[in-house]
């Protein structure tokens, strides 16, 4: 917890001053690190509900384990994240095009990809409390696996549990009607490879990108939205000549790290874990996990994998349809290799929230202290870019000016108008929502204190709480520069 002693309304007479943070003992030093981490996670979950980022799915019926709904702020944050991914991966490049595949696909897709037979986790049952548990995530005591729920050692032998959600297409519920909710978006890219190649007329190397829902019947969904049963992926399949695979794996790792830096995840919270050959999928010639330091531990955010020609080969074999590429230079047909950066929307969103969450003590001019909760989201990601406040709600001129500013900005970005409560309270509400800028229309704006500051406003920075005056006409350019 940082200590900042400031009054940030700008509308009282106290001095702005910062006290040395080391002069105040850190609260966290009093607790074990684990306790502090779980408290921090609890506070983040509570803020997510309180401010409308994330709600439990079907909450009024007791919820549904592993499923979440995104509220008004959450949905904006998600859109900003997905749109920035799309911009970086597709719009800013000539070599990548998009796809939006269906969630339900022909069952043969999952036969060919191997998911029907091998997409499983090892599961055990606790004979004592009947919990279903992932065998590879059990705690051990004296070399014996233990049930984390009741502490019993009486567990069944591990057996494979397929993670795909099974469903039926059409009116009959027999084996011929079986299919699955897709457990990854990648397979529709592979099975549409031929069509996309033909219509886009791309030459190797080129990529197909997709953002969409995926479903896995996880044995133990946990850590809030980190591991859920319904989630969203942002995947790229980048097709190339076989000899380009190793180099492109390194290239995409770097590109993806650049992406995370550009959405505000600092380098020191990110780790790259190279998966050793014996732990990689049999078809992979190299895999990196990009990991993030969540409060509950260092965990995978994204996988970057060199999948060779495995997927296209499998689909060519199973469908009997050619999925080869014709290289005009060498006049040869071959199956392209592929490098796949595969990220999770929900996990990245959780990483953004965890990295952004901060608390600091602020003290006003009367010496009264309070905790300021602030989400230091990158302005690019922030759900609301700017709060607009008339200093008083019962002054028609102030209100009119503030509403004019809202109208001026609305077409370009998400803005929020708030006239209720003291100005300091309004700032605090936006701090918790992660809104990077606040614009206050005051008596200077309407010329009551002379012509010098007419048609200027106060711009308040969320992170430093500093304020400056800016002409209304300059606001759109000022904000655009920060948020794009
Ligand atoms: N096509 C490759 C693939 O799906 P994966 O490592 O199984 O690879 C890719 O998944 C990413 O999808 C993960 O890094 C993670 O961000 C996200 N993801 C996977 N399972 C998830 C789950 N149960 N809940 C939330 N996100 C998940």
Image: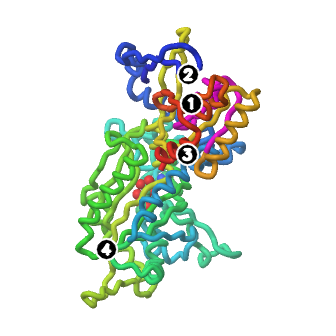
Q: Earlier in the sequence, mark 3 or mark 2?
A: 2
Q: Is residue 253 left or right of residue 45?
A: left
Q: Earlier in the sequence, mark 2 or mark 1?
A: 2
| Dot 4: element | strand
Q: In 3D space, how far apart are the residues under numbered discs 3 and 4 (Cα atoms)? A: 42 Å
Q: Earlier in the sequence, mark 4 or mark 2?
A: 2
Query: Which stretch is magenta?
Result: 415-444
Labels 3, 4: front one: 3
Colour scheme of the picture: rainbow
Screen quadrant of the N terminus: top left
Label number found at residue 458: 1
Residue highlighted by disc 4: 240
Residue drawn at 44 percent across, 27 percent down: 35
Q: Earlier in the sequence, mark 4 or mark 1?
A: 4
Q: Is residue 16 left or right of residue 330?
A: right
Residue drawn at 46 percent across, 38 percent down: 354
Residue highlighted by disc 2: 10
Q: Is residue 101 above or below residue 23?
A: below
Residue 42 in the image: state x and y as whole percent. 52, 32
CB of mark 4 within 8 Å of CB of mark 2? no
Nearer to me, 100 or 168: 100
């Amino acid at each position: 917890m940082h200590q900042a002693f400031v009054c940030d309304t700008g509308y009282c007479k106290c001095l702005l001053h910062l006290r040395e943070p080391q002069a105040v003992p850190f609260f966290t030093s009093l607790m074990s690190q684990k306790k502090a981490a779980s408290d921090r996670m609890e506070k983040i979950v509570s803020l997510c509900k309180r401010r409308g980022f994330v709600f439990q799915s079907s909450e009024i019926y007791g919820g549904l384990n592993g499923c979440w709904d995104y509220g008004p702020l959450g949905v904006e944050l998600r859109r900003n994240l997905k749109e920035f991914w799309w911009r970086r991966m597709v719009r800013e490049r000539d070599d990548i095009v998009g796809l939006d595949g269906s969630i339900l696909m022909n069952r043969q897709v999952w036969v060919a990809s191997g998911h029907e037979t091998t997409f499983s986790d090892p599961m055990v049952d606790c004979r004592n409390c009947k919990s279903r548990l992932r065998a590879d995530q059990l705690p051990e005591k004296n070399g014996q696996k233990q049930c984390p729920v009741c502490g019993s050692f009486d567990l069944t032998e591990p057996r494979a549990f397929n993670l795909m959600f099974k469903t039926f297409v059409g009116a009959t519920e027999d084996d011929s009607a079986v299919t699955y909710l897709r457990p990854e978006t990648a397979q529709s890219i592979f099975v549409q490879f031929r069509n996309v190649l033909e219509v886009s007329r791309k030459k190797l190397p080129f990529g197909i990108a997709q953002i969409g829902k995926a479903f896995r019947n996880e044995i133990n969904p946990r850590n809030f939205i980190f591991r859920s049963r319904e989630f969203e992926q942002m995947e790229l399949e980048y097709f190339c000549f076989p000899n380009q695979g190793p180099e492109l794996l390194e290239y995409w790792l770097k590109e993806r790290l650049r992406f995370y830096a550009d959405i505000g995840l600092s380098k020191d919270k990110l780790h790259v874990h190279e998966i050793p050959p014996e732990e990689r999928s049999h078809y992979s010639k190299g895999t990196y996990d990009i990991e993030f330091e969540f409060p509950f531990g260092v965990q995978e955010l994204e996988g970057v994998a060199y999948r060779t020609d495995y997927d296209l080969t499998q689909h060519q074999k199973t469908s009997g349809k050619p999925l080869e590429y014709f290289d005009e230079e060498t006049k040869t047909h071959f199956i392209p290799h592929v490098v796949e950066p595969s990220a999770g929307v929900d996990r990245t969103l959780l990483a953004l929230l965890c990295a952004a969450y901060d608390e600091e003590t602020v003290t006003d001019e009367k010496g009264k202290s309070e905790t300021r909760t602030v989400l230091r989201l990158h302005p690019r990601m922030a759900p609301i870019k700017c709060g607009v406040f008339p200093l008083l709600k019962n002054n028609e001129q102030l209100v009119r000016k503030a509403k004019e500013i809202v109208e001026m900005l609305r077409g370009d970005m998400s803005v929020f108008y708030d006239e209720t409560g003291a100005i300091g309270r309004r700032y605090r509400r936006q701090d918790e929502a992660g809104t990077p800028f606040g614009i206050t229309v005051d008596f200077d704006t309407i010329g009551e204190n002379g012509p010098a500051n007419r048609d200027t406003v106060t711009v308040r920075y969320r992170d430093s709480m500093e304020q400056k005056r800016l002409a209304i006409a300059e606001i759109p350019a000022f904000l655009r520069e920060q948020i794009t």
